[in-house]
């Protein structure tokens, strides 16, 4: 066998080894990614969310192009949500939405983002930032995916958020009224009427609008 043939067959053997090696590596990678996915799902099923997060995070970091990676990205959000680590859950859900905006799970993801805020609604005497954030997410879900079953669930939460915001406005208005800041109170009560009608606070707000107006008119007559 001449030198050219020796070189030719050597090249063929090298190429074959590379092809087989790559195929073996890909198969091994999928096997490992699948194992991490199974471990994560098993831990999640057992409500061992800490171990589930560890498995899903490894899968996401080590095998980002695996067919199981998208599962890990979604379940990371769910695991954080069940641990009530809502900021981490929101981060995971938003990352999923940014990476897979057309995925069929997006209505669920947007709903879960809303729930992460909704579950932290505070009392009416406190800042209502969570209510506003939840409302924004739920309204986006209803507007963008009106036929989704999650949209109908969101509608019930929207009512609760609006009720919380209405009662907060009334509470602040009442605070100003008692402090005899009648113009500031009047504006708060008018906000209830304009923005949150028919939520159980409307009639009380109307009563205090009349009271505020009477106090303002009385102060005006005293100055004259």
Image (cartoon, helix red, strand yellow):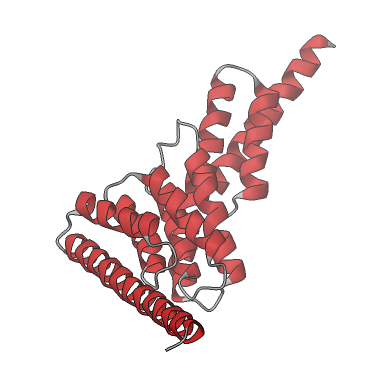
Residue placed furthest toward the bottom: 1
Measured as percent of width and height from the top left, residue 138 is found at 52, 59
Residue placed furthest toward the top: 223
Residue placed furthest toward the right: 224
Measured as percent of width and height from the top left, residue 2 is found at 46, 86
Q: Quadrant of the C terminus?
A: top right
Measured as percent of width and height from the top left, residue 11 is found at 46, 79
For the question of whether residue 78 can be seen, the reply is no
* Left/right of residue 87 with respect to residue 170 in the rendered view: left
- Residue depicted at x 61% and y 43%: 192
For the question of whether residue 22 can be seen, the reply is yes
Q: Nearer the viewer, residue 161 or 142?
A: 142
Q: Nearer the viewer, residue 109 or 25?
A: 25
Measured as percent of width and height from the top left, residue 60 is found at 38, 58
- Residue depicted at x 20% and y 64%: 39
Q: Quadrant of residue 172?
A: top right
Q: Quadrant of residue 21?
A: bottom left
* Left/right of residue 7 with respect to residue 54 in the rendered view: right
Residue placed furthest toward the front: 2
Q: Nearer the viewer, residue 73 or 165?
A: 73
Q: Quadrant of the N terminus?
A: bottom left
- Residue 59, above or below 190: below
Number of marks in picture: 0
Q: Nearer the viewer, residue 30 or 172?
A: 30
- Residue 65, above or below 158: below
């Amino acid at each position: 066998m001449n030198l050219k043939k020796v070189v030719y067959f050597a090249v063929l053997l090298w190429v074959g080894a590379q092809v087989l090696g790559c195929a073996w590596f890909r198969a091994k990678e999928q096997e490992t990614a699948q194992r991490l996915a199974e471990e994560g799902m098993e831990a999640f099923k057992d409500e061992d969310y800490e171990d589930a997060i560890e498995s899903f995070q490894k899968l996401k970091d080590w095998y980002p192009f695996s067919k199981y990676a998208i599962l890990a990205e979604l379940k990371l959000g769910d695991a954080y949500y069940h641990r009530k680590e809502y900021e981490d859950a929101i981060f995971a859900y938003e990352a999923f939405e940014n990476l897979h905006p057309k995925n069929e799970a997006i209505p669920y993801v947007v709903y879960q983002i809303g729930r992460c805020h909704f579950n932290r609604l505070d009392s009416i005497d406190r800042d209502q930032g969570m209510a506003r954030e939840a409302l924004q997410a739920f309204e986006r879900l209803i507007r963008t995916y009106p036929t989704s079953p999650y949209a109908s669930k969101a509608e019930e939460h929207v009512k609760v958020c609006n009720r919380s915001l209405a009662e907060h406005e009334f509470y602040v208005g009442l605070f100003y009224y008692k402090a005899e800041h009648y113009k500031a109170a009047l504006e708060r009560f008018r906000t209830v009427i304009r923005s949150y009608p028919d939520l159980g606070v409307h009639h009380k707000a109307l009563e205090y609008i009349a009271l505020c107006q009477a106090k303002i008119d009385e102060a005006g007559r005293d100055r004259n």
